[in-house]
Amino acid sequence: MGIDNHQPGRPAAPPRVEAPNVPPVAGRAPAEEPTPPRDAPPPRDDPWDTLVHAVDLQGRMERQPHQTLLVAFAFGFVASGALFTRFSARALGLAFRVAALPLLEAALTPTGPDRASRG
């Protein structure tokens, strides 16, 4: 196949594989690229365009503006380092207490036939 240029202490290079059905002849036209499916988005060379198309921020803003605003706020809150502050601990504690109120009320409220007769 070729000359073995392996040197001690260095990993051996993988063997060179020639592409099938493409002889290395100068002046030969490259093979045609396959046609993309009709429903596929147009090919983009710029990775930023690909990311923008995949995320679809504009469409997401139009469909769910409140959710997008909350996600942006949460991202900024975490990125600013405010997650590990006393304010965050107090707000999280308050949120847990408010969320636990209906569960606590349901556990302490009597249920059964005697409740219906009092009402």
Image (tube, helix red, strand yellow):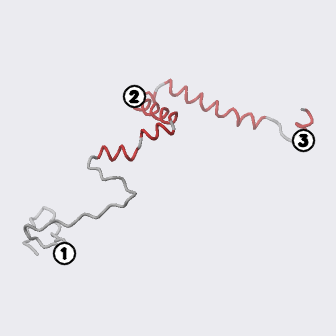
Frontmost of labels 1 and 3 is: 1
Quarter of the C terminus within the rendering = top right
For residue 26, side relative to residue 18 (left or right): left
Q: Give the residue drawn at x 77%, y 35%.
A: 108
> Quadrant of residue 75 in the image?
top left
Task: Assess disc 3: are there few (<14), some (14-19) or many (≥20) residues with their C-alpha within 10 Å of its C-alpha.
Answer: few
Q: Which amino acid does label 2 sit on?
A: Ser
> Quadrant of residue 118 in the image?
top right
* Mark 1 vs 2, N-terminal side: 1
Q: What residue type is labelled 3?
A: Pro
Distance between the alpha carbons at the discs numbered 1 and 3: 85 Å
Q: Is mark 3 on a helix, strand or loop?
A: helix
Q: Is mark 2 on a helix, strand or loop?
A: loop
What residue sits right under mark 2 in the picture?
80
Residue 113 - label: 3
Distance between the alpha carbons at the discs numbered 2 and 3: 55 Å
Q: Give the residue drawn at x 89%, y 37%.
A: 116
Residue 21 - label: 1
* Mark 2 vs 3, N-terminal side: 2
* Mark 1 vs 3, N-terminal side: 1
Q: Is mark 1 on a helix, strand or loop?
A: loop
Image x and y of residue 22, in percent: 16, 72
